Image: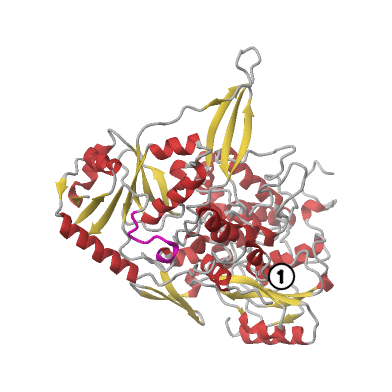
């Protein structure tokens, strides 16, 4: 996948050189191993700073709202689906965004890799499908496929669904017989065990809102948890309040979430908040045959009336 | 100065014994990382933990703390009159902490315990607490403590500093509080002072040698606030920021809080919660005016407070102990070491 980077830089250089866009939003190298950071490039000389690798787990669609002029953005499959969602929800105009699509073979699960080491990781490099990870005590060569993030393992839209240019050859899409094994596993628990699962899940939440703020869907000018008149939710660490935040945020994402994994990626407590959103994605698929962000011309199911609606109450 | 040797075989028994006097806190491994927790019976502090996700600050300054309460029942004479939640004055000991976390407590103290104001909640907790640190023999790549005015064997703010010697701990008793804690554990094997001092010295030097990262802070003091405030680099630094509260919550020196009143039926409470300058709500005025409406302004506030305003106000170095938690946890890899160096080396173009 890193072969794309030369192409990405060339495209970015050309766009800035010909003044077709005012800036390019992409990823730059981080200051620590396994980290990359979103960056905006406004000068063609700086396009060398752009990188793209298996650590670019955030969603750049989160950075394209409220930008002035035409901008270019680097988009994986999931980022492109969130751009579609932004267009449907009037957050950006299609002609304002130049999409540099990147076919994606998945991003790595950083926590899973960190867990292999007792000490801190000092160096991380990729060679095709091999990840080379070093700490001061050992060096591991890992098969990337085994260390993908859960959402990437279960991804069925690795190629951008919308783009102006592709920076690499399309990759083969995965077709999964069971696209939601995780949801089924939780659903199979009895009510008490299920409740316990979610209690455990949010136990360490510090309400930093990294999940919400990394999410391209969460662009409300004032989130319901921040509202003070009326105040819907307590702001402390009371369990009910913490859970209310997570439950309601997930519901707000119903039929909109692309399972890009940025929420779980951003969480400093390693909470897999996708356990909430995935269930709603599955419901949207089972009930409405809907996957978010695939088609600019279709309204999301919770945003439209249809005589085919499976629920009786609406007819 | 007293030094005590503790055979690791006696460690658990001693810690257990201290419970007669102390409520214990310490690092505990969880599936999501290590956390400083209230150590329930039979739980021991994880003495090998040098990277708790959150710092010790929560022992004195919990993320949510009920400070006042009242009744809304108007048939009661004292309805709507706020009273203090009784202070928990039991002795506490927090055991196995990173030494620089104790230095951080001293920086936080500058805010909660001043000549004009004494925050009763924080100060009462502080006075009840004994801090037992363990030196970090092998500092990790995120540690830049030596250039932030502390270090892996820093003693500031600690009551006891311990060194891990494989089969034993060597404890340096720094205060009377520390001596009392050791006595409550029944640890009383006095070690030779001269030898112990030399050993600590070797361990400290060895550990400090392993620290690879640093910040330059020497020129911050001589720059004017406006020079830095108006510097051109803030937009670039702030671009990737998602304005979550991670950096401020994991920070051992961030002390800002927000007050919230909550009522349930006839009882009401006043709580204080950690606040974060990254949030658009932070210090937002009741008029609707927001002094820091944009992301860049908020990011600038955090770094200016830590690296310039604090330095100017207290003349005690930067408001950072170099633990590296924010560097490690930031979802978008904004690195305070880089920002500090950019600020320190910035020269305004005429």
Q: Which residues are magenta?
A: B146-155
Q: Residue B240, located in which quarter of the rendered image? A: bottom right
Residue A226 as seen in the image, left or right of residue A180: right
Foreground of the two, B195 or B181: B195
Q: Which residue is mark 1?
A: A80
Where residue B288 appears, as percent x and y from the top left, is 77, 45
User: Does residue B126 appear anywhere in the picture?
Assistant: yes
Residue B49 as seen in the image, left or right of residue A198: left
User: Does residue A180 appear anywhere in the picture?
Assistant: no
| Position above or below: A20 against A81 | below
Residue plotted at (80% across, 69% down): A68
Q: Chain of mark 1?
A: A
Is residue B153 highlighted in magenta?
yes
| Position above or below: A161 against B153 | below
Where residue B242 appears, as percent x and y from the top left, is 64, 60
Foreground of the two, B107 or A42: B107
| Position above or below: A66 against A76 | above
Image quadrant for the C terminus of chain B? bottom right
Residue B234 as seen in the image, left or right of residue A164: left
């Amino acid at each position: 996948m890193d072969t794309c980077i030369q192409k990405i830089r060339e495209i970015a250089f050309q766009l800035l050189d010909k003044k077709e866009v005012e800036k390019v939003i992409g990823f730059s190298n981080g200051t620590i191993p396994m980290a990359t950071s979103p960056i905006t490039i406004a000068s063609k000389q700086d396009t060398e700073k752009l990188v793209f690798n298996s650590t670019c787990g955030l969603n750049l669609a989160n950075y394209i709202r409220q930008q002035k002029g035409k901008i270019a953005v680097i988009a994986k499959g999931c980022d492109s689906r969130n751009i579609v969602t932004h267009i449907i929800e009037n957050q950006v105009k299609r002609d304002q965004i130049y999409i540099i699509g990147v076919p994606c073979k998945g991003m790595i699960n950083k926590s899973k890799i960190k867990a292999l080491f007792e000490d801190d990781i000092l160096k991380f490099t990729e060679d095709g499908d091999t990840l080379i990870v070093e700490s001061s005590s050992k060096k591991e060569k890992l098969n990337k496929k085994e260390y993908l993030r859960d959402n990437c393992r279960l991804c069925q839209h690795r190629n951008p669904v919308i783009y102006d240019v592709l920076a690499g050859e399309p990759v083969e899409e995965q077709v999964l017989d069971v696209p939601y094994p995780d949801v089924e596993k939780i659903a199979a628990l009895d009510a008490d065990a299920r409740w316990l699962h979610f209690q455990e899940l949010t136990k360490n939440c510090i309400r930093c809102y990294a999940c919400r703020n990394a999410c391209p869907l969460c662009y409300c000018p004032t989130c319901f948890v921040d509202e003070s008149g009326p105040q819907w939710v307590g702001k402390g660490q009371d369990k009910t309040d913490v859970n209310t935040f997570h439950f309601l945020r997930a519901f707000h994402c119903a039929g909109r979430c692309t399972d890009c994994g940025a929420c779980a990626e951003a969480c400093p407590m390693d909470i897999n908040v996708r356990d909430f959103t995935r269930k709603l994605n599955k419901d949207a698929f089972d009930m409405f045959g809907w996957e978010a962000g695939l088609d600019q011309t279709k309204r999301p199911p919770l945003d439209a009336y249809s005589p085919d609606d499976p629920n009786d109450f609406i007819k | 100065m007293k030094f005590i040797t503790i055979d690791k075989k006696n460690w658990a028994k001693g810690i257990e014994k201290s419970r007669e006097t102390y409520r214990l806190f310490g690092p505990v491994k969880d599936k999501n990382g290590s956390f400083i927790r209230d150590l329930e019976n039979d739980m021991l502090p994880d003495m090998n933990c040098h990277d708790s996700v959150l710092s010790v600050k929560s022992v004195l300054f919990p993320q949510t703390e009920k400070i006042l309460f009242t009744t809304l029942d108007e048939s009661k004479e004292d309805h709507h009159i706020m009273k203090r939640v009784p202070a928990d004055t039991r002795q506490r000991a927090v055991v196995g902490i990173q030494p620089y976390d104790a230095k951080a407590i001293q920086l936080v103290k500058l805010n909660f315990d001043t000549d004009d104001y004494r925050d009763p909640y924080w100060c009462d907790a502080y006075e009840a607490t004994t801090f037992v640190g363990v030196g970090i023999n092998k500092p990790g790549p995120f540690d830049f403590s030596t250039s932030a005015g502390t270090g892996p064997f820093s003693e500031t703010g600690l009551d006891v500093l311990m060194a891990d010697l494989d089969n034993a701990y060597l404890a340096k008793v720094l205060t009377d509080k520390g001596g009392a804690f050791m006595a409550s554990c029944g640890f009383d094997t006095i070690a030779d002072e001269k030898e112990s001092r030399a050993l600590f010295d070797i361990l400290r030097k060895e550990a400090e040698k392993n620290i690879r990262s640093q910040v330059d802070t020497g020129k911050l003091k001589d720059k004017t606030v406006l020079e830095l405030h108006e510097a051109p680099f803030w937009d670039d630094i702030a671009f990737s920021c998602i304005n979550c509260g991670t950096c401020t919550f994991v920070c051992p020196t961030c002390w800002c809080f927000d007050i919230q009143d909550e009522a349930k039926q006839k009882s009401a409470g006043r709580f204080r919660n950690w606040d974060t300058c990254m949030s658009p709500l932070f210090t937002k005025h009741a008029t609707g005016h927001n002094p820091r409406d944009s992301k860049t302004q908020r990011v600038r506030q955090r770094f200016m407070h830590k690296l310039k305003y604090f330095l100017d106000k207290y003349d005690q170095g930067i408001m950072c102990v170099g633990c590296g938690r924010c560097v490690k946890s930031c979802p978008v890899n904004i690195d305070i070491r880089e920002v500090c160096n950019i600020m320190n080396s910035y020269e305004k173009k005429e």
